[in-house]
Amino acid sequence: MVPDSNSVSTSASLTEDVNISFENITHIVRHSLLPRGGKTILNGVNGQFNAGELSVIIGQSGAGKSTLLDILAGYTDATGGNIFVNGRLRNVKLFRRRSCYILQDDRVQDMLTIHESLHFAAELKLGNHISTEQKNERIKEIVESLGVKAAIRTRAANLSGGQRKRLAIGLELVNDPPVMFLDEPISGLDVSTAYRLILLLRGLARQGRTIIISMHQPSATLLNKVDRLYALVEGRCGYMGSVSLLVPFLAENGLTCPAYHNPVDFFIEISDPNDKNNVVVKQMLVQQSDNGRNISYLQNTVIVNDKDDELVCLSTLPSPKEDPTNKILLALKSTYPTTSLKQFAILTRRTLLTIWRDPSFVLMNVSIHIMMALFVGTLFFKVGGDAKYMRDNFNFLYFSLMFLMFTAFSSATVRFPDQVPIARREHFNRWYNTGAYLGSTLASILPMQTISTLSFCLITYLLTGQPLESLRIAQYSFTLVLVSYVAVCVGLFNGSLFTVKNAVIFGPFLIMPFTVFSGFFLKFEDAPTFFQWIFHISFLKHGLVGLVLSIMGMERPKLACTDTYCHYAKPRQFLKDYDQFIRVSGSFETWLRSTPRSDNEWFKCIGQKIWALED
Ligand SMILES: Nc1ncnc2c1ncn2[C@@H]1O[C@H](COP(=O)(O)OP(=O)(O)OP(=O)(O)O)[C@@H](O)[C@H]1O
């Protein structure tokens, strides 16, 4: 494509202009896996967006605005067509380092203030070559440019819609990207807030950035501030150029915009299939396609500056000191501004701070565990010391296992999807890698999980009258803590795949195989051979084995019997029977025969035993 001759020269704040052009972009979504069929959302659109300009994509709802933005931002791959950056075919990886995408309903961290959010963004997005003073200076500049100084200590949850939108923009401005895409930034804002936001975006553009936004129907006042209009009609480009040239362009095509009518409103009205002028619009589009997709409808823009353009004052950030010989290699590598370890540390700090600010979830979780422990402890009161209740004791162990697994699993399942929109935006805009994010999520969940699980373990252990031996208590608690950690991981996996609603529906399906093959409901031998492998991967089975051993193993002496006859007076007998039932990890008999006499000896060779079990 031929770049516009009228594009503005940019200000000193950005090192390089990024002019984006695209040719013949087509996007088809398939309704099924079959290659045939599908819906054409973009039908061979061409266009150009230049540095220094505020460009606006307009069109009816469903015209394909968001899809075009997604494709230009590199969020979605187009089915066909080419995108160029400064006249050269775009390398998406490199482009994403120089651009950011703010989605329509972008969320920010509700529990953090504007200052804290910007501070964490600066820590993550600015490399070590930028000093703390420079980072603070940057935050100050952004706050002033965004006009949110008065609300700097206000938590995002309490900000107005306009302030939240400005915060979302500010977060991406931290590392000064030369290209910014914003999907419907003014939707839901009142006229004056929308106007201020558009002024801000135009000010950012005037500093040399390429700013591309989508809008439904901008008012005449907003249109005055727009440099380039890109109008989509049912997936085709109907017009591109200055707002002032739209009316003459339409008149050339026999479409007369009534006097005092907002030309964009008029354009959108006639784009409606039910409008009487729609036939002419269709003809216009067909004509453009027939002309070999010529770009006669792509008009040049006329840049007009005014005093409001001085609103934004962001200084240039120093570039990292790089060895020029390594520059190309570095450019091709998918690097982040900070190391994974630093990302992990910052994200963990951020998550812990949000948990600290809103401890209701943690408090509820711990309280539920304590209440449930008291309830279960009362139900199974003192069953642990009487051989008559050996079976009840076993049921209690299984119940504890299931309860802790389910609470850990479901709390991770519902918490994670909540964070996904934020994580998706931040990850897409290259704040951090997924490993650092998942690691920090886990690291911030586990302390709460440990406290809840240990509270449950200790209360139930005492109330149910289990033997008061430190080694047994430690093994019992450790086993349950480990089971709950695994359940958290499975819950995070589930939560990362689905929305909250679907994750809740899919959750039981995911966890059920582990439950059925836990060695409680089904005998190993009775399971069909081709299903028996599931016993081996069931963390609940391994958990149950660990619990049974901690209570009935380790040479536990004969129990008191308050009945005429207690079959399981000798815990060894119970282990024998249980082994016949489960017969998975080797044999308890082997274990029993070689179990050392004292706890101390047992402790020394526990590692050996575990391996023996697996054999
Ligand atoms: N994955 C998909 N599968 C099927 N249809 C889709 C898909 N994505 C988008 N569409 C359809 O493509 C059309 C364009 O969608 P898009 O979101 O780009 O429109 P839009 O112009 O941004 O609309 P709005 O202004 O309402 O957000 C719509 O009709 C939408 O239903």
Image (cartoon, rainbow, N blue to C red):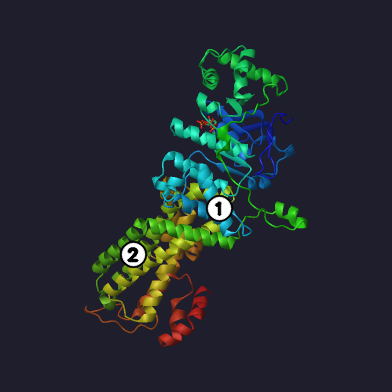
Number of the label disc, if any, that sits on residue 399: 2
Of the pair 286 and 180, the residue shown nearer to us = 180
Q: Is residue 108 above or below residue 41?
A: below
Q: Of tags 1 and 2, which is closer to the observer? A: 1
Disc 1 to disc 2: CB gap under 8 Å:
no
Q: Is residue 91 above or below residue 579?
A: above
Of the pair 410 and 313, the residue shown nearer to us = 313
Q: Give the residue type that dot 1 points to.
A: Glu
Marks 1/2: CA–CA distance: 56 Å
**Regarding mark 2 in the picture, which secondary structure is present there?**
helix
Residue 476 visible to an observer of this rendering: yes
Q: Is residue 209 left or right of residue 530?
A: right
Q: Residue at x 40, y 64 (%)?
A: 449
Quarter of the image where one finds residue 226: top right
**Regarding mark 1 in the picture, which secondary structure is present there?**
helix
Q: Residues within 10 Å of mark 2 (few under 14, many from 20)?
A: few
Residue 433 visible to an observer of this rendering: no
Number of the label disc, if any, that sits on residue 137: 1
- List x then y, in percent, for residue 77: 63, 40
Q: Residue at x 33, y 84 (%)?
A: 557
Number of the label disc, if any, that sits on residue 288: none
Q: Give the residue type that dot 2 points to.
A: Phe
